Amino acid sequence: MTDSKTAAAIDSAAAEGRPAFIGYLPAGFPDKETSIAAAIELVRNGADVIEIGVPYSDPVMDGPVIQQATTEVLARGFRIAEVFEIVEAVTQATDAAVLVMTYYNIIDRMGPAEFARRLAEAGGAGAITPDLIPDEAEEWIAAVDAHGLDRVFLAAPTSTPQRLARIAEASRGFVYGVSLMGVTGAREAVSEAAERVVRGAKEAGAQRVCVGLGVSTRAHVEEIGAYADGVIVGTALVAALRDGGPQAVGRIAAELTGREI
Amino acid sequence: MSTPRYRNAEGPYFGRYGGRWMPESLVAALDELESAFRAAKTDEDFVAEYQRLSRDYTGRPSLLTEVPRFAAEAAGQGPAPRIFLKREDLNHTGSHKINNVLGQALLARRLGKTRLIAETGAGQHGVATATAAALFGMECVVYMGAEDTRRQALNVARMRLLGAEVVPVAHGAQTLKDAINEALRDWVASVETTHYVLGTVAGPHPFPEMVRWFHQVIGEEAREQILQITGRLPDAVTACVGGGSNAMGIFHGFLDDPEVALYGYEAGGEGLDSGRHASAITLGRSGVLHGARSYLMQDADGQTVDSHSISAGLDYPSVGPEHAYLADTGRVRYEPVTDAECMDAFEALCRTEGIIPAIESAHALAGAVRLTRSWGAEAANRSIVVSLSGRGDKDVATAAEWFDLLPPQDGSEAPETGVQA
């Protein structure tokens, strides 16, 4: 048993004999209502966990597709309050665990305690922080713990066993296994590093490891699902939303989760 | 000695600033770099090779030049102080940037890396990196904001001549911070073969400490030279601050001399009220960007605010974390200098001394003018060392436009400035 909302979602997928499906969408892209509708479509078509990405001026881990989407959102005058509104709307409309994915300065500016309070108030499950390593996370961990939220840290192909142990220890919900050395974006093949990261993180004590970066086809999902607890897809969904709206997001989610061929 | 010691501060933290606010993917490379740097500092062969290159290739030590006509002009009717310029503009490639680049290229070679990447604003750091890559036979890619490639077209050509690939970065504000983002994205994917030659005392640990260490020679030489010439320490040292590498380099020599006042001049752009400036310390607040906690220009949501300066090299919305610490402790005083004030000092140095400074460095000259005037009669027995961090050849087109030196545009022919804007 776990009191982590995200871990519970991953475990119930496991109980059905499949990896959890985790879908990323940028907050407010292309506008607030559409991004909520797209997240709901994602859940209807098999997503167990939703990541709502916070548009940020300096997204160093993002490739061109997500950068372009978030730049557009920022250009229309996006404010952070919108993130909590979206989290609340998706949480109310679905039973998925809703995480926020944000670069750390957004949290730092609001103050970790206030950010965690507002996220919990909106019904969010926790946050993924791609540019925060456990070494710098003391204040953040204290803040999310005060509200029982999940805190997801990244593990990389280059992380040493010592670092993996620290990452596993600091994470709650799951460990985000980075499948390759690079930024977000669809890739032809899943790097062989992904399985190594999952094995290393588990050996270091992680209970659940989900894999993201470069995952864009049903074949990738099946391959990763054989050894990971969950599969994270972002760019492929963002491209679908850009080109075909929420319906297209639903279609690709159904395809990726194997509900439709 | 009861004075606090500031010299030789080690990362990752400078007070509450610094650290590693970076994706996990880069931590292994940063650890590897830190151990290589620590080992190299105490390795006689490494230090000897670095010093040999500094002497035979860069041309160190750089001169300390007294500029009495400039000092007299700064003083106006009043008595003039003695003003000395630390001539980093005379280094090979025309700025202080080469000090750091040669050091990091030597480290990269020790680490077995064959490819160098860099960000650049004005182009000086990119030129220096392209130069080192040519010297060491390494591949080189330089990321440069698309806006800056237009402002500094001559340096783009220079880098290409040196065999580097220049990649214009067309997102965000298309300036230095966006070039750093793109270089970081490259590095995450290429870290096995590639060293990221970060060009300033910012970024994740160990960069702030390491880049300062490679530039400390500026302050060490300046301190020795001024003692030799005047027999005593200067009353003030001035330097421009974007990320702050030349400033850390020269300040470091004087940090534990409490009688020497240290002044860092940020880009005040069109004035702080205009919102178009790059004065991170003066108007920023603590935040994290590009791997370090420091002062940061940001909005109420934590989004980075676009900076502005007439000098591309100071057009950065944050500042090295050690500067943030030195500002909080009061050891160094940081003030903004506007584009207009800076260009007055730029013009004055050209006219009175026959030295064309980089517009970045002209902020430090403007600071010296401001100090001179504030001293009034007391200026007579005082001396100032100004960090002249770079030469102004790259800025002639910008200056020609600022001072309206170009023939009227009739739409037929480009003006004969000798420089392609």
Image (spheres, coloured by chain):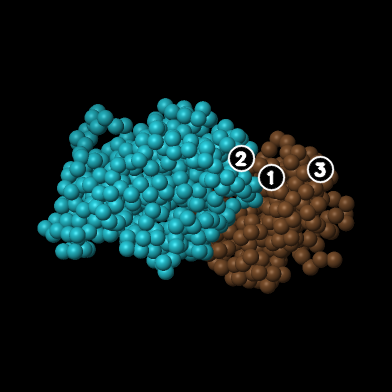
Chain colours: A brown, B cyan
Secondary element at tag 2: loop
Rendered residue at 31%/32% (across/down): B420
Identify the residue at the far left of this view.
Answer: B77
Tag 2 residue: B191
Task: Return the chain for callout 2.
Answer: B
Give the quadrant of residue A6: bottom right
Rendered residue at 30%/56% (across/down): B233
Rendered residue at 62%/67% (across/down): A139
Amino acid, disc 3: Glu
Tell which of A74 and B130 is nearer to you: B130
Left or right: B332 with respect to A41? left
Amino acid, disc 2: Val
Q: Residue A158 carries which label?
A: 1
* Position in image of residue B122 (x %, y %): 38, 42
Tag 3 residue: A222
Secondary element at tag 1: loop
Tell which of B191 and A226 is nearer to you: B191
Q: Which circle, 3 or 2, is nearer the viewer?
A: 2
* CA–CA distance in space, label 3 to label 2: 29 Å
